[in-house]
Image (tube, rainbow, N blue to C red):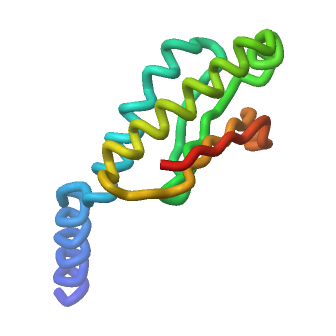
């Protein structure tokens, strides 16, 4: 009977954890990711996804072959747009805060392809 109570207690804790609302940090990250998501459509086939590491670094996953096939002007434009979009998204989520922001472009196995920074 004690085992049943322990199991029920674990189930209740698991249910409460699963049903809890996202934290404010989770909501901020989700909003920031939503703000940069348009880059995936704009650079379809090149930009594969995003992640946020630490509070100030946006990771942009690239299809390396497609990235290599881009001309230098297109790469520079994509990097500028990504930095501007990240800065805008971060500033909207952290009003009146100042930070050095980083955008790290990586390939499919996590190797750094490029990195850009900006300040707010």
Q: Residue at x 38, y 45 (%)?
A: 91
- Residue 120 x %, y %: 47, 48
Left or right side of 4 for 120: right
The tally of labels here is 0
Whether 71 is drawn above or below 14: the answer is: above
Q: Residue at x 32, y 55 (%)?
A: 96
Whether 116 is drawn above or below 97: the answer is: above
In the displayed orientation, state which residue is furthest to the bottom. 2
- Residue 5 x %, y %: 17, 83
- Residue 6 x %, y %: 23, 83
Can you tell which quarter of the image residue 68 is in?
top right
Report the quarter where the N terminus lies: bottom left
Left or right side of 45 for 29: left
Left or right side of 95 for 76: right
Can you tell which quarter of the image residue 60 is in?
top right
- Residue 74 x %, y %: 70, 12
Q: Residue at x 20, y 89 (%)?
A: 2
Seen from the viewer's position, the closer of residues 24 and 86 is 86
Q: Residue at x 53, y 43 (%)?
A: 51
């Amino acid at each position: 009977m004690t085992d049943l109570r322990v199991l029920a207690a674990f189930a209740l804790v698991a249910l409460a954890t699963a049903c809890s609302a996202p934290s404010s940090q989770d909501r901020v990250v989700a909003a920031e990711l939503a703000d940069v998501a348009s880059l995936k459509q704009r650079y379809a086939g090149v930009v594969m996804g995003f992640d946020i590491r630490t509070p100030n670094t946006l990771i942009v996953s690239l299809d390396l072959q497609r990235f290599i096939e881009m001309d230098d002007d297109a790469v520079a434009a994509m990097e500028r747009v990504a930095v501007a979009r990240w800065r805008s998204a971060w500033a909207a989520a952290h009003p009146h805060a100042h930070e050095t922001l980083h955008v790290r472009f990586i390939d499919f196995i996590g190797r750094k392809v490029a990195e850009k920074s900006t300040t707010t």
